[in-house]
Image (cartoon, rainbow, N blue to C red):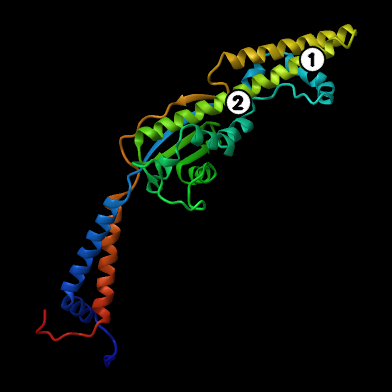
Amino acid sequence: MENNPEEISLRDLFDALWSRRLLIIVLTLGFGIAAAVVSLLLPEKYEASVVLSPVDEESSSKLGGAGALLSQFGGLASLGGVSLGGSGKKSVATATLQSHALTEAFIRDNNLLPILYPDDWDADKKTWTTTDPEKIPTPWKAERMFAKKVRTIAEDKKTGLITLTIEWTDPELAAKWAGELVKRANEVLRAKAIAESQTNLSYLNEQLTKTSVVELQRSIYSLIESEIKQVMIANGSDEYAFKVVDPARVPEQRISPKRALITGVGVFAGLMIGFVLALALPRRSKTLA
């Protein structure tokens, strides 16, 4: 059987690669060193997480049989534009935790714009490096960036636990922000619940003066009692909507950049490019190394 003159044997491939071994070595080392340098220049990021257990109407369960009375009186209350109970629902609490309003207020109240955009901030002059209004960071822009790159909220469908994670270059800030966001969400929801209960109490007391029906008066008194209990529960608990199961700790190990992986990818890329070039370049004389 005759050999095809165009067919390349394994020995030919080896000879081609060996003849260009210096090129392969240089490219492999070059790409590896470049990748290592890039990995050193990338900012280190740390991750701090807090695990939460939503209260999820726990306050309503403490009110005994008042829930049935709420439903009985709900029609009358709705006529007055009043919502009775149900302020601690898990869905509302979770939505509040990641809401635009809460995050924007958190960024604005803690003056986080210079921290979130350090490259655009002149620390010495205490001003932005640009005067272009379109490029100057705003709380609105920061909230979008924060939601996409800094804060992550995940729910475990089996346990119902919620994990809020902050990823940032400063490990202490990451842990601090995670805890403060949960605290702020609890404060907002607690204040809202108290305000709603106070509105409900005003409405119920007004209705009480308008009726002489004993049975209806008893129902109203029961509802007033339940609303007072709601206010007491809200005032007496710092963890009104979320109970902290596992608080955020200051991380000691970074999550990125993965320098070994980046360097390894660089070495592999340089090796592959070296192989391709070694096979693509014209063959050299065997006298040349």
Q: Position of residue 107 (x, y in %)?
A: 49, 36
Q: Position of residue 64 (x, y in %)?
A: 69, 13
Which amino acid type is marked by label 2? Leu
When the figure is inspected, residue 24 is found, relative to residue 94, above or below; the finding is below
Is 264 in front, or is 237?
Answer: 237
Badge 1 or badge 2: first in the primary sequence: 2
For numbered disc 1, what is the local secondary structure?
helix
Q: Position of residue 221 (x, y in %)?
A: 78, 9
Q: In the figure, residue 97 lies in which quadrant?
A: top right
Q: CA distance from mark 1 to mark 2?
A: 22 Å
- Which residue is drawn at the image coordinates 66% and 12% (left, top)? 229
Q: In the figure, residue 24 lies in which quadrant?
A: bottom left
The reply to whether residue 69 is in sight is no
Q: Which residue is mark 1?
A: 204
Is 231 in front, or is 122?
Answer: 122
Which amino acid type is marked by label 1? Leu
> CB under 8 Å between callouts 1 and 2?
no
Label 1 environment density (alpha carbons within 10 Å; few <14, some 14–19, many ≥20): many
Q: Quadrant of the N terminus?
A: bottom left
The reply to whether residue 208 is in sight is yes
The image shows a total of numbered marks equal to 2
Q: Is residue 92 left or right of residue 130?
A: right
Label 2 environment density (alpha carbons within 10 Å; few <14, some 14–19, many ≥20): many
- Which residue is drawn at the image coordinates 30% and 55% (left, top)? 262
Task: Looking at this view, name the residue that lies furthest to the left.
Answer: 287
When the figure is inspected, residue 261 is found, relative to residue 123, above or below; the finding is below
Q: Position of residue 23 (x, y in %)?
A: 19, 73
Q: Which residue is mark 2?
A: 189
Q: Is residue 30 left or right of residue 63?
A: left
For numbered disc 2, what is the local secondary structure?
helix
When the figure is inspected, residue 278 is found, relative to residue 180, above or below; the finding is below
Is 136 in front, or is 145?
Answer: 136
